[in-house]
Amino acid sequence: MRNRFRDLTRMTKLMIIAPLAILGMVIFVFFGGETVMLLWNWLAPALFGLREVTFWQALGLLALCRILFGGFGFSGGNRSGSRWRMEKRVRERIRERMGERWEQMTPEERERCRPGFRDRSGRTSPLDSNPSA
């Protein structure tokens, strides 16, 4: 079976996969809207005294929540990747500045700061050139 699919032309594969993908999206949207509608109609009227919603209103709520809180994922993960890179740069900059400050301290000042650099396992920070633990 695998070899038969591999031997098909690109257009034939597309004609097989495209309807399946569309069907999958329709099923996903249906179950998403139905889930939101059932949860809303079960919880919102009882808890907050709100009225029940139809399937289409639930689908609108689902889309609104995705826009406000989750986006649609069109960025391909670039947002999370760029956020990770930004956080990494911030951590590196903080480490550089702490290293600069550490170098400017006298041995007495370093000794006073050393207890604040210990983590939960009792090890000293990487800034400490002579670990005491």
Image: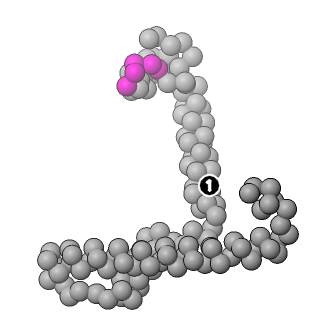
Q: Position of residue 3 (x, y in %)?
A: 80, 56
19 lies left or right of 91: right
Determine if residue 97 is in view.
no
Q: Mostly what secondary structure, the magenta segment?
A: loop
10 lies left or right of 36: right
| Residue at image mark 1 | 81
In the rendered view of the protein, which quadrant contains the N terminus? bottom right
Q: Is residue 122 magenta?
A: yes
Along the viewing direction, whichever of 86 and 70 lies nearer the viewer: 70
Colouring scheme applied when the structure was drawn? one colour
Residue at image coords 20%, 74%: 43
Q: Position of residue 14 (x, y in %)?
A: 76, 74
**In the image, which residues are magenta?**
120-124
Residue at image coords 36%, 83%: 58
Residue at image coords 49%, 75%: 27
**Quarter occupied by residue 2:** bottom right
Vertical comparison of 56 with 111: above or below: below
**Quarter occupied by residue 48:** bottom left
Q: Given the image, on which type of amino acid does mark 1 rest?
A: Gly
